[in-house]
Amino acid sequence: MFLNDIGQPLILDHRKTYGPYEQHDGPLILTAAAFQDHVYPKNWCGQVFGSADDVARFQSTVADATQAYTYNVLTPNEPFQMEYKKIKNTLTLIPTDPNTRLYYLKNDYIRALWVDNLSGYLDFIPKAGTSFQRALSIGIDVIYIDDLCYMSDEDWTEAQRENIYALVELLRPKYLYGLRQDKLPKSLLDLCAQKGALEWD
Protein backbone atom coordinates (compact mmCIF):
# COMPACT_ATOMS: atom_id res chain seq x y z
CA MET A 1 0.00 0.00 0.00
CA PHE A 2 1.12 3.56 -0.70
CA LEU A 3 0.93 6.60 1.56
CA ASN A 4 -0.09 10.14 0.78
CA ASP A 5 1.70 13.17 2.20
CA ILE A 6 -0.01 12.94 5.62
CA GLY A 7 0.45 9.20 6.04
CA GLN A 8 -2.94 7.90 4.86
CA PRO A 9 -2.61 4.54 3.08
CA LEU A 10 -4.37 3.17 0.02
CA ILE A 11 -4.12 0.09 -2.19
CA LEU A 12 -4.50 1.54 -5.67
CA ASP A 13 -7.02 -0.02 -8.03
CA HIS A 14 -6.28 -0.07 -11.77
CA ARG A 15 -10.03 0.22 -12.45
CA LYS A 16 -10.25 3.62 -10.76
CA THR A 17 -9.13 7.10 -11.75
CA TYR A 18 -7.65 9.14 -8.93
CA GLY A 19 -7.96 12.92 -8.77
CA PRO A 20 -5.22 15.37 -7.74
CA TYR A 21 -6.26 15.23 -4.08
CA GLU A 22 -6.31 11.42 -4.03
CA GLN A 23 -2.68 10.90 -4.98
CA HIS A 24 -0.80 8.37 -2.88
CA ASP A 25 2.70 8.70 -4.31
CA GLY A 26 4.52 8.45 -0.99
CA PRO A 27 6.35 5.45 0.51
CA LEU A 28 5.34 1.87 -0.28
CA ILE A 29 4.67 -0.18 2.85
CA LEU A 30 5.23 -3.87 2.21
CA THR A 31 2.02 -5.66 3.10
CA ALA A 32 0.60 -8.68 1.27
CA ALA A 33 -0.82 -6.39 -1.42
CA ALA A 34 2.69 -5.38 -2.51
CA PHE A 35 3.24 -8.91 -3.81
CA GLN A 36 0.02 -9.04 -5.80
CA ASP A 37 -0.94 -7.46 -9.10
CA HIS A 38 -1.46 -3.82 -8.19
CA VAL A 39 -0.94 -0.29 -9.51
CA TYR A 40 2.02 1.99 -8.84
CA PRO A 41 1.43 5.76 -8.60
CA LYS A 42 2.63 7.75 -11.61
CA ASN A 43 4.94 9.94 -9.52
CA TRP A 44 5.91 7.42 -6.88
CA CYS A 45 8.83 8.52 -4.69
CA GLY A 46 10.47 5.08 -4.75
CA GLN A 47 10.77 4.61 -0.97
CA VAL A 48 10.09 1.10 0.31
CA PHE A 49 9.57 0.08 3.95
CA GLY A 50 9.13 -3.41 5.39
CA SER A 51 10.59 -6.31 7.31
CA ALA A 52 13.95 -7.76 6.24
CA ASP A 53 12.23 -10.77 4.65
CA ASP A 54 9.67 -8.66 2.81
CA VAL A 55 12.27 -6.20 1.50
CA ALA A 56 14.40 -9.08 0.18
CA ARG A 57 11.34 -10.67 -1.41
CA PHE A 58 10.30 -7.39 -3.02
CA GLN A 59 13.79 -6.78 -4.39
CA SER A 60 13.68 -10.17 -6.09
CA THR A 61 10.45 -9.27 -7.90
CA VAL A 62 11.36 -5.77 -9.08
CA ALA A 63 11.28 -5.57 -12.87
CA ASP A 64 11.42 -1.81 -13.51
CA ALA A 65 15.08 -0.93 -13.93
CA THR A 66 14.23 2.73 -14.61
CA GLN A 67 12.85 3.34 -11.09
CA ALA A 68 15.28 4.30 -8.33
CA TYR A 69 14.38 2.55 -5.08
CA THR A 70 15.32 3.40 -1.51
CA TYR A 71 14.92 0.41 0.79
CA ASN A 72 14.31 0.72 4.54
CA VAL A 73 14.34 -2.39 6.72
CA LEU A 74 12.23 -2.10 9.87
CA THR A 75 13.19 -3.86 13.09
CA PRO A 76 10.12 -5.44 14.72
CA ASN A 77 8.56 -3.36 17.49
CA GLU A 78 11.11 -0.55 17.13
CA PRO A 79 9.84 2.88 15.99
CA PHE A 80 11.41 4.17 12.77
CA GLN A 81 11.48 7.89 11.96
CA MET A 82 10.48 8.61 8.37
CA GLU A 83 9.80 11.89 6.59
CA TYR A 84 7.92 12.59 3.37
CA LYS A 85 7.09 16.06 2.03
CA LYS A 86 8.16 17.58 5.37
CA ILE A 87 5.68 15.43 7.32
CA LYS A 88 7.46 13.44 10.04
CA ASN A 89 6.04 10.01 10.82
CA THR A 90 6.98 7.33 13.28
CA LEU A 91 6.42 3.89 11.76
CA THR A 92 6.52 0.65 13.76
CA LEU A 93 6.39 -2.88 12.37
CA ILE A 94 4.38 -5.19 14.64
CA PRO A 95 4.70 -8.86 13.66
CA THR A 96 1.70 -11.01 14.56
CA ASP A 97 3.13 -14.32 13.39
CA PRO A 98 5.90 -15.36 10.93
CA ASN A 99 3.74 -14.58 7.90
CA THR A 100 1.66 -11.55 8.88
CA ARG A 101 2.21 -8.14 10.35
CA LEU A 102 0.65 -4.85 11.39
CA TYR A 103 2.02 -1.34 11.09
CA TYR A 104 1.52 1.45 13.59
CA LEU A 105 1.98 5.03 12.35
CA LYS A 106 2.04 8.16 14.46
CA ASN A 107 2.46 11.76 13.41
CA ASP A 108 1.22 15.17 14.54
CA TYR A 109 -2.22 14.42 13.11
CA ILE A 110 -3.07 10.82 13.82
CA ARG A 111 -2.40 7.49 15.54
CA ALA A 112 -3.19 4.79 12.98
CA LEU A 113 -2.96 1.02 12.77
CA TRP A 114 -2.70 -0.75 9.42
CA VAL A 115 -3.90 -4.34 9.43
CA ASP A 116 -2.68 -6.79 6.83
CA ASN A 117 -3.72 -10.41 7.42
CA LEU A 118 -4.42 -11.64 10.94
CA SER A 119 -3.98 -14.95 12.66
CA GLY A 120 -6.53 -16.09 15.21
CA TYR A 121 -4.42 -14.94 18.14
CA LEU A 122 -4.03 -11.45 19.60
CA ASP A 123 -1.10 -12.32 21.88
CA PHE A 124 1.15 -10.05 19.82
CA ILE A 125 -0.39 -6.99 21.51
CA PRO A 126 1.39 -7.36 24.89
CA LYS A 127 4.65 -8.02 23.03
CA ALA A 128 4.49 -4.82 20.96
CA GLY A 129 6.77 -1.89 21.83
CA THR A 130 6.14 0.88 24.33
CA SER A 131 5.12 3.36 21.63
CA PHE A 132 2.23 1.13 20.58
CA GLN A 133 1.29 0.34 24.17
CA ARG A 134 1.11 4.07 24.89
CA ALA A 135 -1.12 4.53 21.85
CA LEU A 136 -3.47 1.83 23.11
CA SER A 137 -3.79 3.57 26.47
CA ILE A 138 -4.66 6.86 24.73
CA GLY A 139 -6.73 5.30 21.96
CA ILE A 140 -6.22 4.51 18.28
CA ASP A 141 -7.66 7.16 15.97
CA VAL A 142 -8.15 4.94 12.93
CA ILE A 143 -7.61 1.37 11.82
CA TYR A 144 -7.09 0.69 8.12
CA ILE A 145 -7.70 -2.91 7.07
CA ASP A 146 -6.92 -4.80 3.90
CA ASP A 147 -10.55 -5.66 3.28
CA LEU A 148 -9.98 -8.25 0.55
CA CYS A 149 -11.75 -10.82 2.73
CA TYR A 150 -15.02 -8.86 2.35
CA MET A 151 -14.80 -9.04 -1.43
CA SER A 152 -14.75 -12.83 -1.70
CA ASP A 153 -16.51 -15.92 -0.36
CA GLU A 154 -13.47 -18.21 -0.47
CA ASP A 155 -12.90 -20.54 2.47
CA TRP A 156 -10.20 -18.42 4.13
CA THR A 157 -12.31 -15.24 4.26
CA GLU A 158 -14.63 -16.26 7.11
CA ALA A 159 -11.77 -16.81 9.56
CA GLN A 160 -10.14 -13.54 8.49
CA ARG A 161 -13.38 -11.61 9.04
CA GLU A 162 -13.67 -13.10 12.53
CA ASN A 163 -10.06 -12.14 13.32
CA ILE A 164 -10.61 -8.56 12.15
CA TYR A 165 -13.82 -8.29 14.17
CA ALA A 166 -12.04 -9.50 17.31
CA LEU A 167 -9.23 -6.94 16.90
CA VAL A 168 -11.57 -4.02 16.21
CA GLU A 169 -13.82 -5.01 19.11
CA LEU A 170 -10.80 -5.03 21.42
CA LEU A 171 -9.18 -1.77 20.28
CA ARG A 172 -12.32 0.28 19.53
CA PRO A 173 -10.78 2.85 17.18
CA LYS A 174 -12.53 6.14 16.45
CA TYR A 175 -12.70 5.31 12.76
CA LEU A 176 -12.33 2.29 10.53
CA TYR A 177 -11.55 2.24 6.81
CA GLY A 178 -11.02 -0.38 4.15
CA LEU A 179 -8.05 -0.08 1.81
CA ARG A 180 -9.69 -1.50 -1.31
CA GLN A 181 -13.44 -0.98 -1.52
CA ASP A 182 -15.99 1.67 -0.63
CA LYS A 183 -17.94 -0.05 2.14
CA LEU A 184 -17.35 -2.17 5.21
CA PRO A 185 -20.01 -4.18 7.08
CA LYS A 186 -22.16 -2.09 9.42
CA SER A 187 -21.57 -4.63 12.20
CA LEU A 188 -17.86 -3.80 12.01
CA LEU A 189 -18.32 -0.03 11.78
CA ASP A 190 -20.63 -0.11 14.79
CA LEU A 191 -17.65 -1.16 16.93
CA CYS A 192 -15.98 2.22 16.40
CA ALA A 193 -15.79 4.53 19.40
CA GLN A 194 -16.76 7.37 17.08
CA LYS A 195 -20.24 6.48 15.87
CA GLY A 196 -21.10 7.25 12.29
CA ALA A 197 -17.61 6.61 10.96
CA LEU A 198 -17.57 6.95 7.20
CA GLU A 199 -16.40 4.27 4.82
CA TRP A 200 -13.35 4.90 2.66
CA ASP A 201 -14.24 6.55 -0.62
Image (tube, helix red, strand yellow):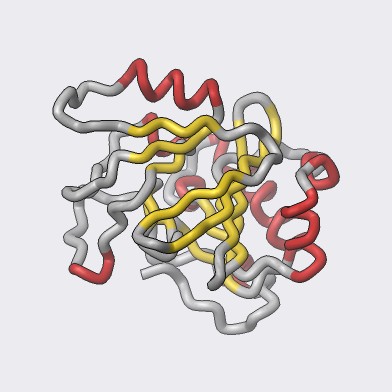
Identify the residue at image location x=57%, y=34%: 74
Front residue of 182 and 152: 182
Vertical order, 100 against 17 (above or below): above
Q: Residue furthest front?
A: 86
Q: Residue furthest bottom?
A: 196
Identify the residue at image location x=22%, y=21%: 63
Vertical order, 97 against 130 (above or below): above
In x, y percent, where is residue 105?
Answer: 57, 55
- Dividing the picture into quadrants, the one containing residue 166 is bottom right
In x, y percent, where is residue 85?
Answer: 35, 60
In x, y percent, where is residue 95?
Answer: 67, 35
In this rendering, position of residue 19 left or right of residue 48: left
Q: Residue furthest top?
A: 60
In this rendering, position of residue 151 left or right of residue 131: left
Identify the residue at image location x=53%, y=54%: 145
In this rendering, position of residue 82 left or right of residue 93: left
In x, y percent, where is residue 53?
Answer: 53, 21
Quadrant of the image for the C terminus?
bottom left
Identify the residue at image location x=41%, y=31%: 71
* Count of number-bearing discs: 0
